Amino acid sequence: MVTQILRNTSAVLGLSALLAAPAGAVEDTAIRLSKDSLTLALDPEYGGRITELWYRDRDLLAVPQPGENSFGSTFWLSPQTLWDWPPIPEHDTAPYTVSSHSMETATLSSAFGAGARVSKTVILNSGQSATMHYRIDTQKDFPEIAAWEITRVPNRGLAFAPVSTDSVKTVRGRVAYELEDDTLWLPMEAGAPLVEGKVVANGTEGWLAYAVDQLLYLKIYPKVSSRDMATGEGDIELYLSGELPFLELEVQSAARSLKGGEGMDWSVEWLVTELPEDIEIRSGSPALLDFVRTQVEQLSQH
């Protein structure tokens, strides 16, 4: 009970610091970056994980009941067959080293795990957008490897992305997604029974969106052709937990081979903005798609 109470206060105090602190002491280890309306928190003591994403007074990563490791935004190697389960601890949960930190940017690096080291640089570009830059450095050969960003949000609202419809497949459990106008839609109702499921797809425009409470959270990443997706994966993946009320918004890079000593770089742009009141958050909304595409175009011009 005490642990759960502490977790529910993590958006303000820093989750890992609370869990690690001795009785009667609270030490916040989070790094906070802030620019105008946007604030992010990273925890170098817990996988360099992004634990908070505030837009004004709203934290989009504030899951109602975060589990032991089911919170925030993390990074894994793809395909999952490189490590099966659980994720490589050096990349996902172990401490990262902070190499630079200012009010608007931070760079953190993991230790080597399973033959690879992960570095993350987070840059706040404006009060609405941030760049997540990832680098994988290797110390062994990888015949196939890709970058993988995993972000947990509450399982309500609407997730959607334009996709190649013949690439969409449910790879675990059941997912009540909809396909309309070459777009994958996943509407979610707060309080609905929890059902585990995962759907993967090949995106066609290089973005994945999540809309809730008239807010839009958008991930924009380099497009991946179907032939370059990691084996058994998609560059867009949506996972619903059957035990806790969260959705994973996942995007991946193209897969490639790396020799030991080589590295690869990959960036994802995050955008958070308000949706106009006249745009209804629903599957199949042309106005919602038009709004997102306008945001993507405007961001690409900066």
Image (cartoon, grey):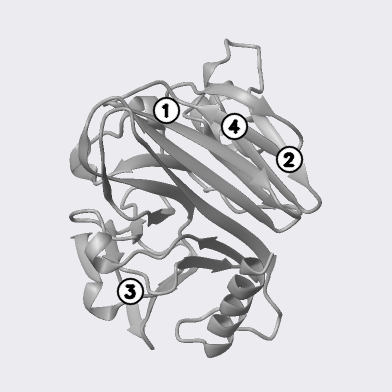
Q: Compute the Cα span from label 2 to label 1.
A: 23 Å
Question: Which residue is depicted at the point 25% across and 72% down?
Answer: 168
What kind of element bears circle 4?
strand
Residue 177 badge: 3
Which of the two discs, 2 and 1, sits closer to the camera? Answer: 2
Question: Which residue is depicted at the point 33% across and 74% down?
Answer: 177
Spot occupied by residue 91 in the image (x, y as percentages of width and height): 39, 30
Residue 93 badge: 1
Spot occupied by residue 13 in the image (x, y as percentages of width and height): 66, 30
Q: Mark 3 Cα within 10 Å, few/some/many (few <14, many 20+)?
A: some
Three-letter code, disc 3: Tyr
Is the residue 295 above or below the residue 46 in the image? below
Residue at mark 2: 104
Say which label, 1 or 3, has the lower sequence index.
1
Q: Compute the Cα span from label 2 to label 4.
A: 11 Å
Three-letter code, disc 2: Glu
Residue 9 appearing in the image:
no
Which of the two discs, 4 and 3, sits closer to the camera? Answer: 4
Q: Compute the Cα span from label 2 to label 3.
A: 37 Å
Q: Compute the Cα span from label 4 to label 3.
A: 36 Å
How many labels were placed on the picture?
4
Is the residue 257 above or below the residue 206 in the image? above
Which of the two discs, 1 and 3, sits closer to the camera? Answer: 1
Q: Compute the Cα span from label 1 to label 3.
A: 30 Å
Residue at mark 4: 107
Three-letter code, disc 1: Thr
